[in-house]
Image (cartoon, rainbow, N blue to C red):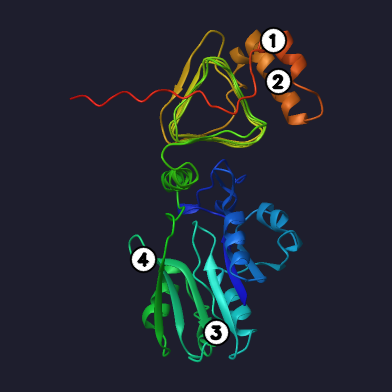
């Protein structure tokens, strides 16, 4: 089966997370970006030919997917920026498959479990809608076939128009299939909800996932659910969790506290930071001023705090910057800096240090 998939760049009301560095499809969900999860779901159901339709999206998703060879599939990329919405181009691509074809249509805006795809079923005029098993809402995905491919509303302004057509504006028969689906990622709050949902599935029972390549200081405290990526380092007396995902090759320095947070890959978080309900952009240095302690407790994206003039002059900030530069270059071992800067107590650990959960009050 073939698929036509819409990849929008903007979130709700034209909002981008971290400027335009992260279109919704490239947001990091615990261990990999959203678009990779969608791609794996497609390939896992035998969909090996995909037309990706980009609308106001950066080049990141296109470069990440490539021609599909990585997944053993054939990917083609189309830009819909010349249109007011992506749906005129979607209509053209659907119609090009012919009235005898069958196409999976969808949007990259949530995690989704796709149902088994059964091509060539006898009812050539039907629509198979994929709905959320949680609340019965439309997930943005459907199997379209027969004359519906030619009738698709290219004039649709947004997804609500498409949904109205699929449910009531056509002459074909309708079938509904309920499948597990994550929340639609529209804003910062819904993104954090999606992360918590994926994290709960990856770390059932408040587990703590630490790869062998991670290094955790003996005095650090981890409270699940926590997911650490490869090459992550957790410093002395750091507190991580609950509900924290740290991307690969990131460093969480000493006395730092992370709760309900997402740390993108290749990031250094300086000591004495407390980030709660925050997202830390990748390739960043986040550090407080000299002798200070920073507490961020809003659902906000955190960019670099290292450009503050006082922070630039602080010896600890200079050390943090040096370690971050080394980490981002990736060619110089950080062991030298641990010895010079006194952070050699970090160790590799297969058994995480778990903060005991207090007993419930009677």
Q: Which quarter of the rendering shows the C terminus?
A: top left
Q: Residue furthest front?
A: 351
Residue 149: which disc? 3
Q: Nearer the viewer, residue 184 or 86?
A: 184
* Quadrant in the picture for residue 323: top right
Distance between the Cα atoms at labels 2 and 1? 9 Å
Q: Is residue 81 visible?
A: no
Distance between the Cα atoms at labels 4 and 2? 47 Å
Q: Which residue is mark 1?
A: 341
Determine whether 135 is above or below 251 in the image.
Answer: below
Determine whether 137 is above or below 14 in the image.
Answer: below
Q: Position of residue 201 (x, y in %)?
A: 46, 47
Residue at 71 percent of width and 14 percent of height: 338
Sequence-first disc among 4 and 1? 4
Distance between the Cα atoms at labels 3 and 2? 55 Å
Q: Which quarter of the rendering shows the N terminus?
A: bottom right
Residue 141: which disc? none
Q: Residue furthest right?
A: 331
Sequence-first disc among 2 and 1? 2
Residue 137: which disc? 4
Residue at 71 percent of width and 67 percent of height: 73
Sequence-first disc among 3 and 2? 3
Q: Which residue is mark 2?
A: 323
* Quadrant in the picture for residue 188: top left
Sequence-first disc among 4 and 2? 4
Whether tag 2 and tag 1 are in contact, CB under 8 A, the answer is yes
Distance between the Cα atoms at labels 3 and 4? 22 Å
């Amino acid at each position: 089966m073939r698929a036509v998939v819409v990849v929008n760049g903007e979130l709700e009301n034209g909002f981008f997370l971290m400027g335009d560095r992260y279109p919704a499809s490239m947001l990091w969900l615990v261990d990999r970006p959203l678009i990779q999860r969608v791609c794996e779901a497609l390939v896992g159901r035998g969909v090996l030919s995909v037309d990706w339709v980009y609308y106001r999206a950066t080049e990141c998703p296109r470069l990440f997917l490539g021609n599909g060879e990585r997944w053993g599939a054939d990917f083609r990329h189309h830009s819909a920026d010349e249109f007011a919405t992506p749906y005129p181009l979607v209509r053209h691509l659907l119609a090009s498959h012919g009235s005898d074809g069958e196409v999976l249509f969808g949007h990259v805006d949530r995690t989704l479990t796709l149902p088994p795809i059964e091509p060539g079923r006898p009812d050539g005029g039907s629509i198979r809608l994929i709905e959320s098993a949680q609340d019965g809402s439309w997930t943005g995905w459907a199997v379209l076939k027969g004359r519906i491919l030619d009738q698709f509303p290219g004039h649709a302004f947004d997804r609500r128009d498409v949904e109205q057509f699929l449910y009531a504006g056509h002459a074909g028969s309708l079938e509904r299939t309920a499948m597990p689906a994550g929340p639609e990622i529209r804003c910062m709050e819904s993104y954090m909800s999606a992360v918590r949902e994926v994290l709960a599935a990856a770390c059932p029972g408040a587990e703590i996932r630490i790869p062998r390549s991670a290094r955790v200081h003996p005095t650090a405290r981890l409270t699940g659910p926590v997911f650490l990526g490869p090459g992550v380092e957790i410093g002395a007396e750091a507190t991580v969790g609950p509900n924290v995902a740290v991307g690969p090759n990131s460093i969480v320095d000493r006395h730092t506290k992370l709760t309900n947070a997402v740390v993108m890959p290749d990031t250094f978080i300086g000591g004495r930071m407390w980030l709660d309900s925050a997202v830390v952009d990748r390739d960043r240095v986040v550090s407080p001023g000299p002798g200070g302690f920073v507490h961020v407790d809003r659902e906000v994206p955190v960019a670099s705090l290292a450009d503050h003039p006082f922070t630039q002059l602080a010896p600890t900030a200079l050390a943090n910057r040096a370690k971050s530069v080394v980490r981002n270059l990736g060619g110089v071992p950080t062991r030298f800096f641990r010895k010079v800067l006194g952070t050699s107590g970090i160790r590799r650990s297969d058994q995480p240090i778990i903060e005991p959960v207090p007993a419930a009050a009677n």
